[in-house]
Image (spheres, rainbow, N blue to C red):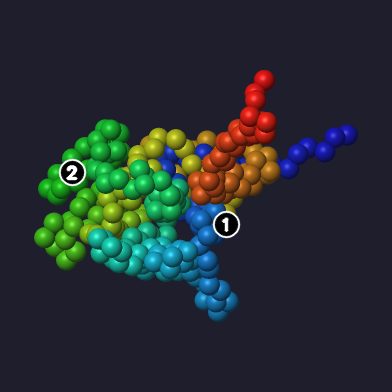
């Protein structure tokens, strides 16, 4: 009798902003293995610190029930003030990864300024009433840029339940955060494709079928494990120079001054 292959139960969840946080390694492993970020080890503290190769960016994962779990700080650069971004613990890792993937992209075209509101317009989000910003079609997420308040110019993206009375997570981008990074987040936010959650990472904010579509299926364990490895390899390939075409060999002229 053949032994059935090992499988794991997977949930495919939409919309992604209500899919829960997911596996942090989706962010931390590629940063270390594909992008050269180094990590510090403090066995007495339940946190992760990752530094960029140029030591200008620091990603901190520090579980805090009362605050933001993920914080990304970037030092001042020529023509660019220091900036920060932070994300609540239930922010889907796929959305945070969109930011870190864009930050580490060596292609200058990926760093061009862009409008963070444009992906929302394309996804049929509607302008919010009473405050500048946009609201998702189901009313459980909104994006706004603060005006003359405590932190003018900052971007706040919030996911809520019960008509905005229960916050699920919030992402914050300081006023000097490059707009292409905010746009990367809003693009991932409006992506209609489902995200997968395995046992242990499937703590969804709600199972209300009016808000969340959840399709459960058994998937081979090796395929689930390969998803992260494939992601690492794809990101690493961005930093690998394309092979150059060898030049054709030069013909040596005849020494007797005559040619055939």
Q: Which quadrant of the view contains residue 88?
A: bottom left
Please identify the quadrant where the N terminus is shown: top right
Q: Earlier in the sequence, mark 2 or mark 1?
A: 1
User: Which residue is nearer to you in this view: 197 or 225?
Assistant: 225
Q: Position of residue 155 (x, y in %)?
A: 25, 55
User: Which residue is nearer to you in this view: 175 or 112?
Assistant: 112
Residue labelled with disc 1 = 33
Single out the residue that lies furthest toward the bottom: 44
Q: Nearer the viewer, mark 2 or mark 1?
A: 1
133 left or right of 94? Answer: left
Q: Position of residue 106 (x, y in %)?
A: 43, 50
Secondary structure of the residue carrying numbered label 2: loop
Q: Position of residue 222 (x, y in %)?
A: 68, 43
Residue labelled with disc 2 = 128
Q: Residue at x 28, y 57 (%)?
A: 177
45 left or right of 105? Answer: right
Mark 1 crowdedness (10 Å alpha carbons): few <14, some 14-19, many ≥20: some
User: From this viewpoint, is residue 116 visible?
Assistant: no
Q: Residue at x 30, y 34 (%)?
A: 123
Q: Which quadrant of the view contains residue 16?
A: top left
Counting labels gives: 2
């Amino acid at each position: 009798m053949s032994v059935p292959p090992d499988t794991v139960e997977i949930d495919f969840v939409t919309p992604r902003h209500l899919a829960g946080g997911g596996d942090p390694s989706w962010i931390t492993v590629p940063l270390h293995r594909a992008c050269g970020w180094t990590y510090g080890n403090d066995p007495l503290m339940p946190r992760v610190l990752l530094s960029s190769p140029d030591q200008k960016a620091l990603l901190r994962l520090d579980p805090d029930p009362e605050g933001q779990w993920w914080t990304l700080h970037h030092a001042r650069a020529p023509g660019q003030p220091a900036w920060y971004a932070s994300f609540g613990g239930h922010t889907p890792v796929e959305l945070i990864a969109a930011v870190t993937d864009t930050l580490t992209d060596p292609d200058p075209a990926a760093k061009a300024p862009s409008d963070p509101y444009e992906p929302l317009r394309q996804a049929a989000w509607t302008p919010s009433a009473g405050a500048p910003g946009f609201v998702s079609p189901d009313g459980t997420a909104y994006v706004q840029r603060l005006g003359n308040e405590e932190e003018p110019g900052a971007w706040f993206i919030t996911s809520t339940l019960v008509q905005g009375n229960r916050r699920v997570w919030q992402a914050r981008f300081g006023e000097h955060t490059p707009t292409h990074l905010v746009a990367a987040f809003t693009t991932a936010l409006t992506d209609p494709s489902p995200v997968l959650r395995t046992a242990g990472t499937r703590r969804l904010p709600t199972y209300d079928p009016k808000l969340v579509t959840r399709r459960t299926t058994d998937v081979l364990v090796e395929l689930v494990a390969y998803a992260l490895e494939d992601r690492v390899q794809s990101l690493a390939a961005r930093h690998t120079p394309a092979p150059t075409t060898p030049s054709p060999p030069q013909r040596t002229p005849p020494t007797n001054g005559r040619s055939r």
